[in-house]
Image: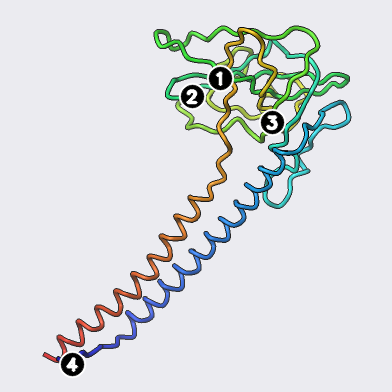
Amino acid sequence: MRLRFRFRSIPFLATVVLVALGIALGNWQLRRAHEKEAIAAAILERGRLPPMVMGSGSGVHEDDRVDTGVHPTEYRRVRVTGEFVAGWPLFLDNRPHEGRAGFYLAMPFKIAGSDRHVLVLRGWLPRDPREYTRLPKYETPRGLTTIEGILVASAGHVLQLGTAAPLKPGALVQNLEVNALARASGLRLEPLLVQQTGPQLAGEVLVRNWPAPDTGIDKHRGYAVQWYALAAMAALFFVITGFRSGRKQAE
């Protein structure tokens, strides 16, 4: 039986639009994946650099961000000397670790020889399974101390359940912004946070096994595949329906 194809202009135009859209959006997602690959490579390279010493004249500034939105010192290892502001602990809720519920302990750290502070994510603490509001115990070094860590832009964002609690010493919050803490505490804070990695004191309960940053490369690749698949399906649908219409017309 001779195959006949029935060409219809409106379905053809709709197919062209869908194919062009799918290819364009797929290409855009691939470009985003390549950009994220460059960011991931930069993160890896920064991790190999020696620790940067944060002192009175080496702060980080909000207007230092590059076009990618990543601060040039973000994900750099850092060493800073100063004192913890023990009277301003904050607990970040909904931060599970290895299947257990818990908190991140955040605390301002006054940089030695400066009036500036940096917010330190000191580590993870487990939640008391019997009492939701009971906060875990921890130790804070007294006096001048030197810590090491990784500079990060935020503590991560989780879904805000209900109204955010007011920022005050000992507050249990779900999300924390540096600017909001600066306003609430009156402290001059650097725009980046320090994700503390050491030193680990004897008997310290804080866990510092921080999750690796997720740049979302696989997500963009997956979206690209979906858009290309849409383009292919639109073209295939046009061809199949054209032959079906041609066969019916021949009958």
Please tell me which residue is depicted at 77% across the width and 26% down the height of the picture.
79
Amino acid under label 2?
A: His
Mark 2 vs mark 3, CA separation in Å: 19 Å
Q: Which mark is residue 60?
A: none
Amino acid under label 1?
A: Trp
Please tell me which residue is depicted at 41% across the width and 60% down the height of the picture.
226
Q: Is residue 45 left or right of residue 132?
A: right
Amino acid under label 3?
A: Ile
The residue that mark 1 highlights is 124
Above or below 235: residue 55: above
Q: Is disc 1 in contact with disc 2, using a CB cutoff of under 8 Å?
A: yes
Within-10-Å neighbours for mark 1: few <14, some 14–19, many 20+: many
Please tell me which residue is depicted at 53% across the width and 19% down the height of the picture.
103
Q: Is disc 4 in contact with disc 1, using a CB cutoff of under 8 Å?
A: no
Label count reads 4
Q: Which mark is residue 2?
A: 4
Q: Position of residue 139 (x, y in %)?
A: 64, 7
Mark 4 vs mark 1, CA separation in Å: 71 Å
The residue that mark 2 highlights is 97
Within-10-Å neighbours for mark 2: few <14, some 14–19, many 20+: some
